Image: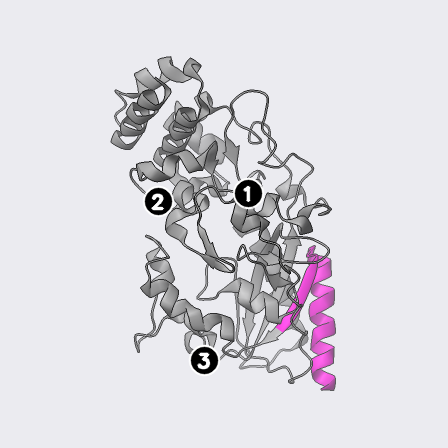
Amino acid sequence: MQQSLEIQAVVTKAAKDAGFDLVGIAQVEDSPELEFFPRWIAAGHAGEMKYMEARDEQGRLKRASLAHAAPWARSVIVCAINYNSDQPYSTVSPVEPRGWISRYAWGAQDYHEATLRRLREVEAAVRSAYQYPDLITRSYVDTGPVVERVIAKYAGIGWIGKNTCIINQKLGSWIFLGVILTSLDFAAGVANVPAPDRCGTCTRCIDACPTEALIAPYRLDANKCIAYLTIEKRGPIAEELRAGMGRHVFGCDICQDVCPWNRKAPVTKAEEFQPQDGLVNPSLEWLADMSAEEFRRTFRASPVRRAKRSGLRRNAVVAMGNSGERKFLPLLRKLIGDEDEVVSEAAAWAIETLE
């Protein structure tokens, strides 16, 4: 017990020194929340995200059981950092039609890299304090066979909201998570107690979702999620979902913007997450007609790269079609002849919608 408390003290100090806002430790054990995962996959709710279906040598879904994915792991350190900025929410419409890039992608550095760099510092501190020859550690930021929000719950970081995001009572849900798997075995009862679910009877996130992606409390169908459609989905987007996408060109913050726990969310102090010029309510014309070189230059260190230039331009064209603004017609007519067939098809749809 004493050693476990000492390890927790080392972890807490290292996380604070690295710039994290929250830190907790969870035991490696199968949780009730992961029992639904195989059914979620089987129902096709992961869409085209095949990496979610990664399996071990026995054919078991890795993300359904950390004990199977990393049998050597005994405990997990979970670190969280606030990325909220002092800018309007997506639910506040600009004076003229503009696009929306998700809040987490405004910074000058990809959050994966910024968070992992800090996480490595915590990992190094643990390895320095406990130089066991057989100690194993692995750090992940959205890259491992881990359902981070479930582990974060049991590490005391927050509860899983009805919008499926981790919510902290003081920070809200604008937080990035990083996890460190470790072979260190913390004594039972020392790890943090899971935070109680404080969503209550509120259903604002469910009610506000334009595409009805939140099919039930705590259940998301990625096929309908605007974040999935604008980032992960390749090729044309189903026409029946386009209107619900509104002005979103990369990601979606609606279910977080309407959450009462984000009303007083503090602003981050991390320099990497401060908004870059032009990314808050970006020009749709700029995005839709962006050259390959400009895309590389603008988003070379940004998570927006995940959507690829084709996807970002497609999304901007769809947003033009949803705008109701005929001023976009000249550019859309030009894009009808674009070499990218996905962009060309979206332009034809937008023109028909606006006319």
238, 48: nearer the viewer: 238
Q: Position of residue 96 (x, y in %)?
A: 55, 20
The residue to which callout 2 is attached is 233
Which amino acid lies under the numbered mark 1 shown in the image of this protein?
Ile
Specify the label residue 254 is tagged with: 1
| Picture residue at 50% right of the left edge, 45% below the top | 209
Question: Which residue is the site of mark 3?
Answer: 71
Dot in front, 1 or 2? 1
* Nearest the eye: 256 or 83: 256
Q: Residues within 10 Å of mark 3 (few under 14, many from 20)?
A: few
* Residue 290 in sight: no
- Give the spatial CA distance, label 1 vs label 3: 38 Å
Residue 281 seen in the figure: yes
| Residue kind at label 2, given as amino acid type | Lys
Label 1: which secondary element: helix
Work out how far the residue at label 1 is from the one at label 2, CA to CA, in angstroms: 19 Å
Q: Residue at x 67, y 64 (%)?
A: 23
Q: Residues within 10 Å of mark 2 (few under 14, many from 20)?
A: some
Name the residue nearer the viewer: 178 or 36. 36
Give the percent coordinates (x, y) of residue 314: 36, 32
**Residue 347, placed above or below residue 306:** above
- Say which mark, if any, is on residue 123: none
